[in-house]
Image: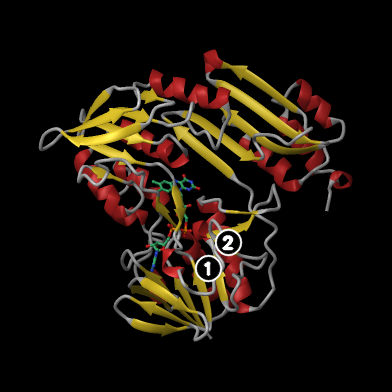
Amino acid sequence: MHHVIIGAGAAAVSAAETLRQHSKTDKITMISAEGANPYSRMAIPYLLTNKIDEAGTHLRQRPNYYDSLNIEVIKDVAVSLDCANQSVMLENGGALSYDRCLLATGSVPLKPKIEGINNSRVHNCWTLEDARSVAQYAQADMPVVLMGAGFIGSIILEALALRGVELTVVEHQDRMVPRMMGEKAGGLLKGWCEYKGVRILTSTDIVRVEQRSETRLNIHLSTGDVLDAGLLIAAAGVKPNTAFLQGDQIVVDHGVLVDEFMLTSYENVFAAGDVAQALDFSSGKREVQAIQPTAVEHGHIAAMNMLRASSVRHRGSLVMNVLDTLGLLSCSIGIWQGVEGGDMVERFDPDRYRYLCLQFDGEKLVGATVVGHRDHQGALRGLIEGRYLLGAFKEVLMKDPNKIMEAYLAVAQTDATLVR
Ligand SMILES: Cc1cc2nc3c(=O)[nH]c(=O)nc-3n(C[C@H](O)[C@H](O)[C@H](O)COP(=O)(O)OP(=O)(O)OC[C@H]3O[C@@H](n4cnc5c(N)ncnc54)[C@H](O)[C@@H]3O)c2cc1C
């Protein structure tokens, strides 16, 4: 059996390892558009802050790791898929046949339609190559503008601030991380960043990029202001990398639609990670999550089903976004916005940069937002993922949401509260 994995990121590596763990003899080929060493995008901020070198970003550090597992990594680009003939067309290597194929091509950054955006001093921060360019320009005291304060933008923000650049963040929405947190929590994050010396402009758009001199840009804003910058980093969102699928039989909605076995609309073709639109734990709908733990989970489940059809069912991945922004920890889990008719309790302490919000659906905890607390995340995740009925502990939490660990220990150890 030949398993061909298109991609070499978190989902791909998780799948390849699972395949090898369960089959010593199947042939496994990973196609890597970006070189022979699979790496983690999540490690890029550590590279930018010199905590690691490029080798430190590699997914698995042991020399010859993939060779030792008899996993072939091909540096090439998949340009199309011929599902009927079970083959992948490569840019350089011709057609590659498969028995099972996994689409693990991740996301690509969105390109905002802004005049001047193609300037050589405008970069994304998505690939290792991007990171090299960012490192070249983002030197201490250089004025740098970051477009977008979403989850990825906020991660990059910290790396840039730690590099000592003179940083301004421009965000279209009225707060930071608008798809991860509400007004109060997003506002706290903004206040914290400003306190740490980062300028944050919310409800503001970049409308034009102009080359002012050889080394400087003028960044024109919707407010009429103009920012000086030696580098503009675009972190204005990503979309599933499905372009190479055009014209074939794989059904794509926002991402590649997969069932609970990570199977696409075509037999023997699976999808995992950022490219996949798969079951969400909380909503029960198929959604693109674009976070690394989900990619790893998808890769594992897809691989199990590539080995033996319908053997492992995906119950849906729980969204959990965690940020450590210049020392302020924040996190949102599950349905952090709440459900219609559900109860909510919150504690807001802006002077100490602290916020805690719990969202309930009946007796179950379904979502939470945490800012400034270091000790709640594990118990919150456990309560939400376990779908425990809280019973009397719901009232305890409504009165004091800080009693998360007590609630978790009480209900998680009582079988009677479990909903199976
Ligand atoms: C700076 C940064 C920080 C991040 N931090 C976090 C974090 O803290 N927490 C978190 O959960 N997530 C984080 N993410 C997001 C996380 O990295 C992604 O969700 C994760 O990488 C998705 O894994 P994936 O395997 O689906 O896709 P990717 O890791 O994007 O891998 C896709 C692979 O496919 C290859 N490829 C693409 N097209 C082709 C083709 N046509 N042919 C061959 N190969 C192809 C690519 O080269 C790549 O190897 C971060 C992302 C960035 C950029």
Question: As displayed, is residue 113 above or below residue 144?
Answer: below
Tell me, for residue 49, which label it has, or none: none
Categorize mark 2 by other alpha carbons within 10 Å: few (<14), some (14-19), many (20+).
many
Q: Residue 294: image x %, image y %?
A: 56, 54
Residue at x 50%, y 83% (from the top left corner)? 86
Q: Residue 271: image x %, image y %?
A: 54, 66
What is the C-alpha distance between the residues marked 1 and 2?
8 Å
Name the residue that disc number 2 marks.
Answer: 298
Name the residue that disc number 1 marks.
Answer: 15
Question: In this image, 126 relative to 229: left or right?
Answer: right
Q: Residue 179: image x %, image y %?
A: 54, 37
Of 225 and 60, nearer the camera is 225
What amino acid does circle 1 point to? Ala
Question: In this image, 310 relative to 121: left or right?
Answer: right
User: Residue 91's image quarter?
Assistant: bottom left
Callout 1: helix, strand or loop? helix
